[in-house]
Amino acid sequence: MRADATNSLLPDGLRDVLPPAAAHESAVLRGLLDHFHAQSFQRVDPPLVEFEDSLLSGPGAATAAHTFRLMDPVSQRMMGVRADMTVQVARIAVSRLAKQPRPLRLSYAGQTLRVRGAQLRPERQVTQAGCEIIGATSPAADAEVIALAANALSATGVTGLSVDIALPTLAPQLFEALALDGQTRANARAALDRRDAAAIRDLGGEAARLFGALLDASGRADGALSALQAIDGLPSDGAAEIARLSAVLPRLAASVPDLAVTVDAVERRGFEYQSGLSFTLFAKGVRGELGRGGRYHAGAGIKGPDDAGEPATGFSLYLDSVMRGVPGARAEQRCFLPSDHDPESGRRLRAAGWITLAGLEPVGDIAAEAKRLGCTHFINTADGEHAVPHRIP
């Protein structure tokens, strides 16, 4: 292998984004942020690297296995490269913006880096864009963030959207209510993750009945909600989560009537730090999830081990997946300006919305040079100060 080829190799999960894809990705990201801003989500921009003890505190502990670590040569303290931006936004909310009125609506976008990719998401460097509502407990906040994420994706051109709503706290609440021993909990958790109805039946007794009912209460939203509401013997916290779901679904249907909604009462993978109703966004024909979010405690543990933080809900969209669902970039109208062009003509064209490319050296065949450089049009300086773009034949 040639040395220059070896030097151009990148680590697994990392990639160069080339033109025109880089400009298209930037435009899609700008569209998402504009959509968030239009609904009063104010943008914050946390640093790429933070001290490890703040980045991985509270809910951030769930990202510890995914976080690159390095030593700060100035302070001699360990730092981490963010693997997720949600924890950073929560830190800002409960510290720098602690005196701002609640509920606090924040948006963000930036690069994240993970130690390794997953089977469905092999990328290790991913651009996140998302929103958080800090200090709100009502179901209206849950419905707002799901609807905001879905509508923002629709605005970029993503079609065939669906959301899978999870209740990741239900099973742990049942573990406690049934006073299951450690081994039985592990068996039940593994069976629920595999959706193994036979293994659930083998638990026997009330555990088999309740966990079996949770497994059965998954699918299209209306049917799943009815099945959940029919389960007897759920702890009060679990009943409250189902009541929250029943309040969210009609609001969501009113805000995004074309959104396909399903419910999975036992899903918890990827929701390790969520404290309530959570969700994952998909699009038909697009590999991997477009984003995920849900309830959590913002800033938990920042002020001390007993600090519960503030109630919050939000979402993160993953731009790599989003880009697989948006329409391709439209061809740009690019006009070649010969090296001896009048600068005023270039300013006039750009003011009219053209993209211009100025030649650096005189050429004999202007049209051929414009075509070689990927332009769609050119001007001929022989036309004078009012030269207009000619399409390349």
Image: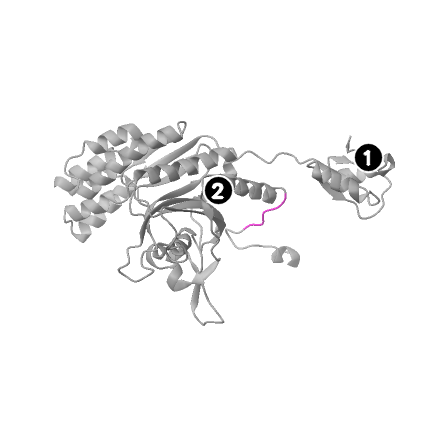
Q: Which residues are magenta?
A: 15-19
Quadrant position of the N terminus in the picture: bottom right
Query: What type is the residue that disc 2 sits on?
Result: His
- Figure check: 335 above or below 311: above
**Near-viewer residue (71 or 141):** 141
**Near-viewer residue (184 or 138):** 138
Figure quadrant of residue 77: bottom left
Quadrant position of the C terminus in the picture: top right
Q: Earlier in the sequence, mark 1 or mark 2?
A: 2
Residue at far left of view? 205
Mark 2 lies on a secondary structure that is helix
* Pointer 1 residue: 386
Q: Which disc is residue 37 wearing?
A: 2
Q: Is residue 254 visible?
A: yes
Q: Name the magenta segment's main secondary structure.
A: loop
Q: Are marks 1 and 2 in contact (CB under 8 Å)?
A: no
